[in-house]
Amino acid sequence: MPSFAADVKNELAHKLDKKICCQTAELAALLRMGASITLGTNLMLGLSFVTENAAVARKTLTLLKSAGDVQTEVTVSRSQRLKKNNRYSLRVVPSPNVRPLMEQLGMLGDTEGSMGRDKALLKKQCCRRAYLRGAFMGGGSINRPEAECHLEMITDNYGFADTIVGVLRRMGFPAGFTDRKNHYLIYIKDGEAIMDFLSIIGATKSLDEFESGRNLKEVRNQVNRLVNCETANLQKTVDAAHYQNACIKLLKDSGALNNLSAALNKTAICRQENPDATLAELAEILLVSKSCVNHRLRKLVSLAEELKEKQKETGEPIEKIH
Ligand SMILES: [Zn+2]
């Protein structure tokens, strides 16, 4: 079963911004997530980019083609890792056209930590969205809607991670930032914020899926809460009935039961004959209201408790107390 993250990337791979400014921003972010510069003959520059996601490979190729007059090559190989995913190696063949493209994408001239060029790519709102889309495609993952809410992007480039967090926070996202063994991790753990993120990067189908998955989870939780609550109530009813029966037995053994009003007497007997019945069931048998039964049982319990107290004070056996 493909992961939800793969679904999201697949959806995004089929979206192409019409505006060149946004295409450039998205490609810059995608390449920041793992492209490396290669050198050809005559020190001509090329690019190499590896991904295990077919959708990401396709999108990167499309954007590269659209960005400049460059020649690309793709090779597919089996990953050496256990899951045996395909590995897509994209290569931009070294040529004189690659340098201007890389300059445009902010990949030249800057040290790794300084993202000056990327900031220039991010002046417009439309481009910031496209940039986040590229970052998510290149290094993002997201839990299934039924699981704990978690979306993250991982990169080994500090400047890039810092830029992503900056963009997210300026847009009002509660984005967290942490480092993990040579990697920088940007994450969002709030369900509403994750939905906003999917919306602004244009993953509308995935957003719907996420939302209905979350609703389903919410309903399931509610049902569980109700069941737990009913179980607790049932336990309370059973405990109460057990205590009432013990009290009635005490009153009966001491002979006190016979001295009570006919109504209390009848209720006590009815409770003893139906030790597991609910208040509603007792009310039906006695042909009185539920609150009336409740009141009478309370009275019986309090009489028994008084009796117990007296018994403790005098130390007399139960039989002699009337
Ligand atoms: Zn734009």
Image: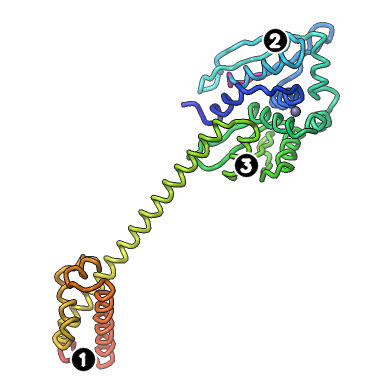
User: From what the image shows, is residue 269 above or below residue 52?
Assistant: below
Amino acid type indicated by mark 1: Glu
Give the number of the disc on residue 72. Answer: 2
Give the image location of residue 278, x and y in percent.
Answer: 24, 66
The quarter of the picture where residue 165 lies is top right
Which residue is at 27% across, 74% downward?
A: 294
Q: Residue furthest top?
A: 41
To which residue does mark 3 refer? 188
Q: Which residues are magenta?
A: 50-54
- Between 95 and 190, which is closer to the camera in this rendering? 190
Specify how the rendered protein is coloured. Answer: rainbow
The CA distance from mark 3 to mark 1 is: 70 Å
Amino acid type indicated by mark 3: Ile
Earlier along the polypeptide chain: callout 2 or callout 1? 2
- Between 228 and 179, which is closer to the camera in this rendering? 228
Give the image location of residue 88, x and y in percent.
Answer: 61, 16
Which residue is at 63% across, 23% downward?
A: 15
Which residue is at 74% across, 42% downward?
A: 170
To which residue does mark 1 refer? 316
Give the SS element for disc 3. Answer: strand
User: From what the image shows, is residue 274 above or below residue 46?
Assistant: below
